[in-house]
Amino acid sequence: MNLKFKLALFRWSQKLKVFNYWLSAHVIFGILRVLRLLPAEAATNFIDAAARKIGPLMGRHRVAMINLRKAYPEKPEEELQLIARDMWGSMARLTAEYVFLDAIFDYDPHSETPGLIEVQGREIFERIRDESDRPHIFFTAHTGNFELLPICAATFDLNVTALFRPPNNPYVAKKILGARRTNMGHLVPSKAGAAWSLASVLNTNGNVGMLVDQKFHRGLPSIFFDRPCKTNPLLAKLARQYDCDVYPARCIRLPGGRFRLELEEKMELPRDETGAVDIARTVQLVNDKVESWVREYPGQWMWFHKRWNA
């Protein structure tokens, strides 16, 4: 096979890849347009039910089941399959909820009438808002509708710059980025230069938000569900450099299409002999926090990404 033919084959494969991205993105956009025609509750219930049937037929279901068996070797296969179906339903709801963010996020800190959103840790939000003389880091995981957390922060006049990983599909990434910019404040894509962008925010006593539960090939060795994995040390390095407080936050799905957003008190970060934040131990502390969340609501976490080394 000569070089010219190889180059032609490579170009065609790239064109096919782009076409597949375009096609799958427009299928997704078409589904979302149809969902817009339905009431929010009916739309999310419909896509939840559909995903529970379609999800197990997808290739990513195999990854999810491998991960679940690693995390819960003591659980029977039937229970693991149930957790996986719950996950597909939760992830499908997350997709549909992009369409209905304005209808879903009805939290009013001044209202006495409960809505779809309840907030635990209101006093922490208010205290952080008044601490304009120091930087803060918030972290969360891919559980519940984690996209609601920065919207909640904005409700308390907290400006949070969030680090996020765009989807591989560039058409979907562009659409999601547009929605996030409209509803969720400043965003920093997870790529080269992201650390400098977050550092500049913290250097001016700003607030940073991070998702911390994905595999990072150049990360530090750590443990998650009693298994070795690689974890991005960026949060720990920033906390060490700027000596800022670190707060865990999460979203929990509740029955009836409701949500509880929880902001926990700041973590006591481990220190080394010099008094500086210990990076390796902080990485593990964050992993342990995320694991406790996942164990509490396993069906709300994104099991289909490759978190472990093997």
Image: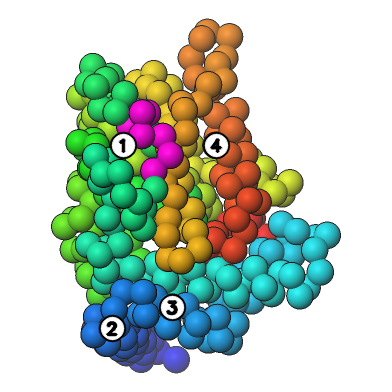
Q: Which residues are magenta?
A: 119-125
Residue marked by disc 3: 45
Label drawn at residue 38: 2
Marks 3/2: CA–CA distance: 11 Å
Q: Are marks 3 and 2 in contact (CB under 8 Å)?
A: no
Marks 1/3: CA–CA distance: 33 Å
Q: Earlier in the sequence, mark 1 or mark 4?
A: 1
The residue tagged with tag 1: helix, strand or loop? strand
Q: Nearer the viewer, residue 135 or 150?
A: 150
- Residue at (31, 23) in percent of width and height: 127
Quadrant of residue 263 in the image?
top left
Figure check: 173 above or below 209: below
The residue tagged with tag 2: helix, strand or loop? loop
Percent position (x, y) of residue 1? Answer: 44, 91
Q: Amino acid at mark 3?
A: Asn
Residue marked by disc 4: 286
Marks 1/2: CA–CA distance: 35 Å
Residue marked by disc 1: 208
Disc 3 crowd, CA 10 A, few/some/many (<14, 14-19, 20+): some
- Left or right of 90 on screen, residue 13: left
Q: Earlier in the sequence, mark 4 or mark 2?
A: 2
Figure check: 99 above or below 31: above
Q: Earlier in the sequence, mark 3 or mark 2?
A: 2
Residue 237 seen in render: no
Q: Amino acid at mark 1?
A: Val
Q: Amino acid at mark 2?
A: Leu
